[in-house]
Image (tube, rainbow, N blue to C red):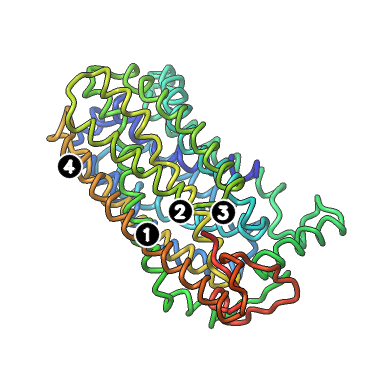
Amino acid sequence: MPIAVLLYLASYIDRANIGNAKVLGLATSLHLTSGQYNWALSIFFIGYVVFETPSNIIIRRVSPRWYIPILTVIWGLICALFATVKSAGGLLAIRFFLGLAEAGFLPGIVYWLSCWYPRTVLGRRFGILYSTVSLTGAFGGLLATAIHALDGTHGIAGWQWIFIVEGCITAGFGLLALFFMSSYPENASFLSASEKRIVLLANEADHAQKAGETFNAKQIRSAFTDWRTWLWGLVYLTIYIPVYSVILSLPSVVIGLGYKGTTATLMACPPYALGFVIVLTAGWTADRYGKLFYHYVAAILVTIVALIVLMTVENLVVRYIMFFFVMFMFIPVSICWVWLGSNVGGANKRATAVGLVFSLGNIGGAVSGQIYRAEWAPRYVQGHAINVGCYVIALIAGTALWWSYKTDNERRDREAGEHDKGGKQDDLLGEDLGDLGDRHSSFRYYL
């Protein structure tokens, strides 16, 4: 978990620091138009969409212990090279390659963690992991402001120092991960033989995960033919558009409240601090009480209300307070990480499905750079309206998934003659799901 959290914190700082760099001199130095800046935000995710799915198939062939740290070093060095950019064209090119290098990291980490923990304790782990995104908003703004104090040192502008320092820190984290990361529980050097057996038995009992599962092309193909994979892609698309658009643009949106420069980056920090707390809380309650779908729905409804208030109210204090409630947007993402990974059986199918769904979701990242356009400032009513529309679609798609899981569980209970189980699963010790994976009659979906 410490490795995953540190690397994920670094990845989000490196992808979102362009928002802070913009208000601290990047746009002025490169003479960027609003359209060029928006495309710089969007092109990052094109690399994501291209490489996420093949990357998660590769990770089944290559040890995560080597693959994930090497990716981290590469994107950290690319981030540092942002300081050499002299034009809008150069910015677009390097943002594309940053996205290509980062693409395999997040789906790889989500898959990797799902190989270590039973479904009933993933909520807290993914809550801890994803809460670093909101921490990025708070810490990233403070860090960028502090680094900007180097403005002019050795003839290098403050915004360039932001990329140099943050990129080098990330590459350093990647090198450290090479020494401390373990691929899977069965080959973890920090676990004793009895501890390895406990972890492996817990995962086998929960979702029939076996130690040393081999590469299986049939399971990989089944991820592409399962209709739920594509519906999950729609869910991720519609919850990622609002999250990415707010993360990338919040410093600029805060300027619409009357703040400028470093003050704008600092005023964007407190809402993210609340986001950090509520994501951790949601992860704990998801593990304690289950009911992932209810967490998902409640968080989306709170966010929709906050966005509608932002669209309709002109009072600056009220609008700033609403940004705290917008931070509920982080909860559906962390909940969906648990929900998706818990309901795909078979390591090969799960790795492929996670990669494909993340690829589809990050099409939303490409769109998100166009949500809060400069010509819609200072209220950004159109941007908030687009995000409300996305959440309405996410509610419909999420409800369809929940209903399909619920009815499948009930049908399998009836077929097994277990009318009072309520979709609860017996342990799967010794059970071989084969190529059927989650379609096996013994598997129960996590609701």
Q: Which residue is mark 1?
A: 399
Please tell me which residue is depicted at 52% across the width and 37% down the height of the picture.
132
Residue at x-position 23% and y-position 21% = 257
Q: Residues within 10 Å of mark 1 (few under 14, many from 20)?
A: some
- Identity of the amino acid at label 3? Ile
Q: Can you say which quadrant of the picture contains the N terminus?
A: top right
Q: Nearer the viewer, mark 4 or mark 1?
A: 1
Q: Residue furthest front?
A: 420
The secondary structure type at the circle numbered 2 is helix
Tag 1 secondary structure: helix
Residue 405 in percent (x, y) is at 47, 67
Q: Label 4: which residue?
A: 35
Compare marks 4 and 3 and give the one earlier in the sequence: 4
Q: Mark 1 or 3 closer to N-term?
A: 3
Tell me which label, 1 or 2, sits earlier in the chain: 2
| Upstream in sequence: badge 2 or badge 3 | 3
How far is the residue under mark 4 from the one under mark 2? 38 Å
Q: Rounded to the nearest whole Å, what is the CA distance between mark 2 and mark 3?
A: 23 Å
**Could you tell me the amino acid type at mark 4?**
Gly
Q: Amino acid at mark 2?
A: Phe
Q: CA distance from mark 1 to mark 3?
A: 26 Å
Q: Which residue is mark 2?
A: 293
Q: Do callouts 1 and 2 mark residues in contact (Cβ within 8 Å)? A: yes
